[in-house]
Image (cartoon, rainbow, N blue to C red):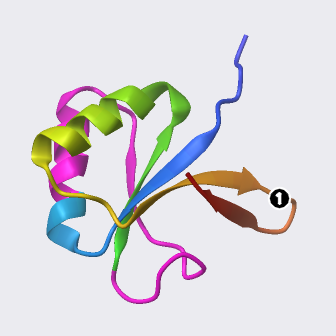
């Protein structure tokens, strides 16, 4: 039985910070994606890491370990034509 989980984005303004966290999560065997930040959240060249709720604790632990505060964390709200984002 495949139960859908909520998805989240953690957003960093710079490529280096996002890439560092992404690599650390991959090493922890997390199924994450490095994506461009949706324009509704941030203009410019920021990157985001997309992950499922099951990885929330690991993501938060790694953010604390690298000591680089993200620009924000957002829950992805699925809609029929587009996604919406709720800052958490």
Determine whether the residue tagged by mark 1 lies in a helix, strand or loop. loop
How many residues crowd around disc 1 within 10 Å: few (fewer than 14), some, or many (20 or more)? few
**Position of residue 72 measured from the top left corner of the image (x, y, whole percent):** 42, 62
For image coordinates 55% across by 51% down, the residue present is 88
Q: Residue furthest right?
A: 80
Quadrant where the N terminus sits is top right
Q: Which residue, given by chain and number where applicable, does mark 1 sit on? A: 79
Residue 25: say if magenta. Answer: yes
> Which residue is depicted at the point 26% across and 32% down?
61
Determine whether 22 is above or below 15 in the image.
Answer: above
Residue 51: say if magenta.
Answer: no
Q: Which residues are magenta?
A: 19-45
56 in relation to 84, above or below: above
Would you place residue 7 above or below residue 43 in this image? above
Image coordinates of residue 75 in percent, x first then y, are 60, 50
- Depth check: give the residue in front, 85 or 64: 64
Q: Is residue 11 left or right of residue 9?
A: left
Q: Residue at x 25, y 49 (%)?
A: 22
Q: Is residue 41 left or right of residue 26?
A: right
Residue 55 found in image quarter: top left
Task: Judge from the rendering whether residue 2 lies leftward or rightward of residue 51; answer left or right.
Answer: right
């Amino acid at each position: 039985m495949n139960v859908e989980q909520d998805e989240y984005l953690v957003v960093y303004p710079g490529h280096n910070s996002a890439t560092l966290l992404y690599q650390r999560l991959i090493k922890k065997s997390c199924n994450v994606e490095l994506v461009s930040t949706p324009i509704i959240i941030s203009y410019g060249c920021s990157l985001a890491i997309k992950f499922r709720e099951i990885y929330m604790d690991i993501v938060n632990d790694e953010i604390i370990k690298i000591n680089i505060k993200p620009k924000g964390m957002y829950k992805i709200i699925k809609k029929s034509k587009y996604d919406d984002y709720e800052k958490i």
